[in-house]
Amino acid sequence: MSKPHSVIRQTITTPIVLIVVLLAMAALTYAFGSRAFNRTAIEMFINIMVVVGLYAFVGNSGLLSFGHISFMCLGAYMTAWLAIPPVMKSITLKGLPGWLLHTQLPMWVATPISGVFAALFALIVGRIIMRLSGIAASIATFGLLGVVNNVYSNWDTVTGGQGSIVGIPPTMNVWIGWLGAAVAIVIAYLYSISRSGLALRATRDEAVAASASGVDIVRERLIAFVVSAFIIGLAGALYGHFLSIVNPGSFYLRTTFITLSMLVVGGMYSLSGAVSGVVAMSVLIELFRNLEKGVSLGGVTVGLPNGVQEIAIGIITIIILIYLPTGLTRNREFSWRGWPLQRRLAPSVQTALKEIN
Amino acid sequence: MSSGGLELVAHEVSVQFEGLKALSEVTLAVPRGRITGLIGPNGAGKTTLINVLTGFQSAGTGSVALEGQAVNGIAAHKLRRMGVARTFQSGRLFRDLPVIDNLEVTGVGLGQRRRDAIAEAQRVMAWLGISHLAGMIAGALPYTDERRVAIGRAIMCTPRYLLLDEPAAGMSEHESHDLAVIIRRIAAELGIGVLLIEHNIGLVLELCERIFVLDSGEIIEVGSPTQIRNSDAVRHAYMGTQQDELLPVEEAVAS
Ligand SMILES: Nc1ncnc2c1ncn2[C@@H]1O[C@H](COP(=O)(O)OP(=O)(O)OP(=O)(O)O)[C@@H](O)[C@H]1O
Ligand SMILES: [Mg+2]
């Protein structure tokens, strides 16, 4: 008990459990799912990337961010610029610099570049936003979402404006979706157990005491902001390859609302919460989508009116949060024997990847 | 003093909060390896002075010097890295984290790798005799354990100075005796300069070599425990504000 214990050894089961469960879902989808169901699964994996990226920042810092979907936007458009064949780009995106107009990169190269691009952008804007505290920082991230959306909606010669740009090679499948989710989980996990992750969780609990412990709050927040932007930039890139078109409307309020709900419903202070929130909400969304399409009961097709999906999901989110304010996972992590063990401790305790002897 | 400049000094520090003078030209020195006391009635400005010394509050006028080096305007986390540690009147543990992580955060904040910070946290917990608390979530600790964890968090990596803001508040006589033993060891064994703020004046008189008395933002008396016991100014300060605060002084005088 008193000999130094390895943080990794105590917490590694969480990412392994998550990645293995998702692998099983991918395999089942590939083996038995229809084409449409495969697309639903890919969308779920991309959402897992986004929400896990959100968790890396929100979960560890305790600051709510409304701006992270702009990193998805940045990643998706960067991928469009890099991956669309030059012939098509020279017609629709005349404003691009020459060297970019004439390149075409495969998904494996375009995706990491897109992630790095989003991360660099976060490094620049984060230097300013991370100085703000609490609610001011959250509002500033909302401003960021608005600014990015405006630029991408109006810079016609580079982004195609309000309309869609088409022509990203549609190379996504359920395995690549799973791989993306696994990469996101590994990065977020490594961040959580890093020095910066621990220091940032301390600032979440007691910012003043963290300063008194030598923690540079602005710096640790900025690191998390950049890491989460990288993950979400990757998600944006894969989303571009998934839809093969991008338009600024996909990266705005609706996506921000849904991904934040997924995080909160799962439990925003745990990695397991981020992943289970997406899985649970994806099941609900799929259910209501089918109900809207209509179910045939003895020859009669009964369907819900369009739009019920959003309302129902809003209501279900509220109900879950009333009964489980810390989310479905109650902010705990999955592990082999972790659950029964942790349940015996104080029930109101919330902790991210905590280490117990 | 004898330590030849090895002290943390506030020099003629004044702090004003929207018209209210919280501190007026306060001068105070905390020498290394010794225990200095700071007492005064509620609202006297004791916490404000700690805040100035640790970088949480900027001094309106006056200066703060750490062993001869001016440290005005240096951020709190940097001052901690330079060796000025503190605890808080309200505890302020990282309540969602286990006790060991509460200590480890300081190691990490001071630049250690997690593995080294964990080893240092275990060493400090053993030194304080709180190793058995390592895995407990800080938010679930009883009050006195909370205080000891807060001290452990502050003495990680052995700072040069430690400012304790009412560490004995709410403790029984027996518990504050244990605390006194720890504070003595911190100064003697670790060579840390301790500034002790306490309403338990008996504890201050027992532990401190030199005591500063603050009232309405002004230092009204400085001296040895004997001088403080016999000071009319101190007696008046306590009588003028709160009658019952006189009692510990008299008890201590009687003992
Ligand atoms: N941030 C602030 N803004 C405005 N006034 C403040 C602030 N902090 C402290 N004060 C005021 O300054 C005065 C000194 O407060 P301080 O907390 O330093 O007293 P204290 O001696 O620590 O008292 P106590 O024994 O109750 O802890 C009080 O009148 C308090 O109301
Ligand atoms: Mg105080």
Image (cartoon, coloured by chain):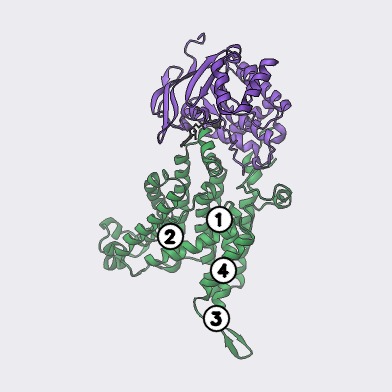
Chain colours: A green, B purple
What is the distance, in whole Å, between disc 3 and disc 1 at their CAs?
Answer: 35 Å
Q: Is mark 2 within 8 Å of ligand 1?
A: no
At mark 3, the secondary structure is loop
User: Disc 4 sits on a residue from what chain?
Assistant: A
Number of residues whose C-alpha sits closer than 10 Å to that of mark 2, classed few (under 14), some (14–19) or many (20 or more): many
Residue B99 - label? none
Which comes sooner in the sequence, label 1 or label 2? 1
Q: Are marks 4 and 1 on the same chain?
A: yes
Which comes sooner in the sequence, label 3 or label 2? 2
Front: mark 4 or 3: 4
Q: Which residue is at a point 56% across and 15% down the rendered structure image?
A: B232
Q: Is mark 3 within 8 Å of ligand 1?
A: no
Which comes sooner in the sequence, label 4 or label 1? 1
Q: Where does label 1 land, which residue?
A: A182
Q: Amino acid at mark 3?
A: Leu
Q: Where does label 3 land, which residue?
A: A304
What is the distance, in whole Å, between disc 4 and disc 1 at their CAs?
Answer: 30 Å
Q: Is residue B221 visible?
A: yes
Q: Position of residue A145 (x, y in %)?
A: 39, 58
What is the distance, in whole Å, between disc 4 and disc 3 at their CAs?
Answer: 16 Å
Q: Amino acid at mark 2?
A: Ala
Q: Where does label 4 land, which residue?
A: A315
Q: Quadrant of residue A174?
A: bottom right
Which comes sooner in the sequence, label 4 or label 2? 2
What is the distance, in whole Å, between disc 4 and disc 2 at their CAs?
Answer: 31 Å
At mark 4, the secondary structure is helix
User: Disc 3 sits on a residue from what chain?
Assistant: A
Q: Position of residue A270 (x, y in %)?
A: 59, 52
